[in-house]
Amino acid sequence: MSFENITLPDAVAVDLKRIADALERLAPKLKPATDLSVANAFVWQPEKGALSPVPRVNRVEMALLRGIDRVRDQLNDNTERFARGLPANNALLWGARGMGKSSLVKAAHASAIAKLDGHADIWPLKLVEIHREDIESLPALMALMRDAKCRFIVFCDDLSFDGNDTSYKSLKAVLEGGIEGRPDNVIFYATSNRRHLLPRDMMDNERGTAINPGEAIEEKVSLSDRFGLWLGFHKCSQDEYLEMVRGYATHYGIKVDTAALEHESLEWSTTRGSRSGRTAFQFIQDLAGRMGLRLD
């Protein structure tokens, strides 16, 4: 029996067309592969399922990161080992605000690239930023990177979890606990003001209301245990702060009397109630603006 000459009623044809359109909208569209050669850094865009290249990374030079020598060397060594294909740990950089945690991650990435440039047997090293609110999409990101001939530092800045947030489970599974686990060509770096990624009052509340206080927060606290490298950043001393200020002034060619520079920078930190690398740089920005200089 042949159906070639059968004409469907208009109403049926319209219904079939509507069904076909709906199925097409539901079907996952194939996304073009991200060209990883166009940049050394990318931002993960989960809604597009793609990596967006960052042509120019907002970095601070390694030499300008003062007062963090020990953690600087540890992260540099860990990053370089990973770039060479050797065993390395996920890293959690935690502690005081403005002391260069995220700046160090970006500087370590640039340093490893510079050291290993020209080694044909070493895969390119890429920095991929994932936003805190996109943590649940980590499995999709890992699938995208797993078979790429590159090594990836996946970086999440200011990572922490509050209240009933359960997205930390996606991170735990990716770091160590899942069936597939973390791909060999991926490492995870995170910064946080909290050592255990949870606020202290939340941990105390769960201890106080739980039948078994010891187990109440164990699952959430165990997330920080997935980071083999813990790097603590502490508030800097006045001498370290002044060293940061002088370093920035020298780097940017700001010529000013040292005594005046130190006096003004201390006043600046007092008004903000903080001494840190961020405070030092903000002072230098203000000083350069008042002097009509550009920080290039």
Image: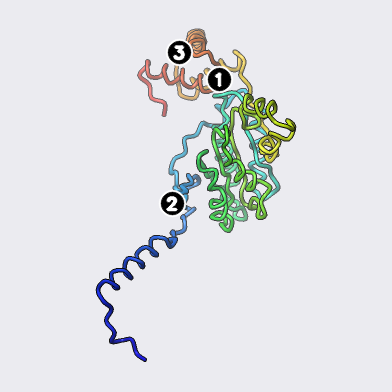
Q: Residue at x 42, y 60 (%)?
A: 26
Q: Is residue 30 visible?
A: no
Camera-side residue of 133 and 148: 133
Q: Position of residue 172 (x, y in %)?
A: 64, 44
Camera-side residue of 222 and 39: 222
Q: How is the image coloured?
A: rainbow
User: Label 3 amino acid?
Assistant: Val
Q: Circle 3 sits on which residue? A: 256
Q: Earlier in the sequence, mark 3 or mark 2?
A: 2
Quarter of the image where the N terminus is located? bottom left
* Element class at badge 3: loop
Q: Position of residue 153 (x, y in %)?
A: 58, 44
Quarter of the image where the C terminus is located? top left
Q: Residue furthest bottom?
A: 1
Q: Earlier in the sequence, mark 1 or mark 3?
A: 3
Q: From the image, state whether disc 3 or disc 2 is nearer to you.
A: 2
Q: Circle 2 sits on which residue? A: 48
213 left or right of 154 in image:
right
Camera-side residue of 157 and 281: 157
Q: Earlier in the sequence, mark 1 or mark 2?
A: 2
Q: From the image, state whether disc 1 or disc 3 is nearer to you.
A: 1
215 left or right of 67 in image:
right
Mark drawn on residue 27: none
In whole angstroms, how far apart are the C-alphas of marks 1 and 2? 37 Å
Q: Position of residue 250 (x, y in %)?
A: 50, 21
In whole angstroms, how far apart are the C-alphas of marks 1 and 3? 21 Å
Q: Is residue 259 above or below residue 48?
A: above
Q: Circle 1 sits on which residue? A: 276
Q: Is residue 264 above or below residue 123?
A: above
Report crowding for label 2: few under 14, some 14 to 19, many 20 or more residues within 10 A (C-alpha).
Answer: few
User: Label 2 amino acid?
Assistant: Lys
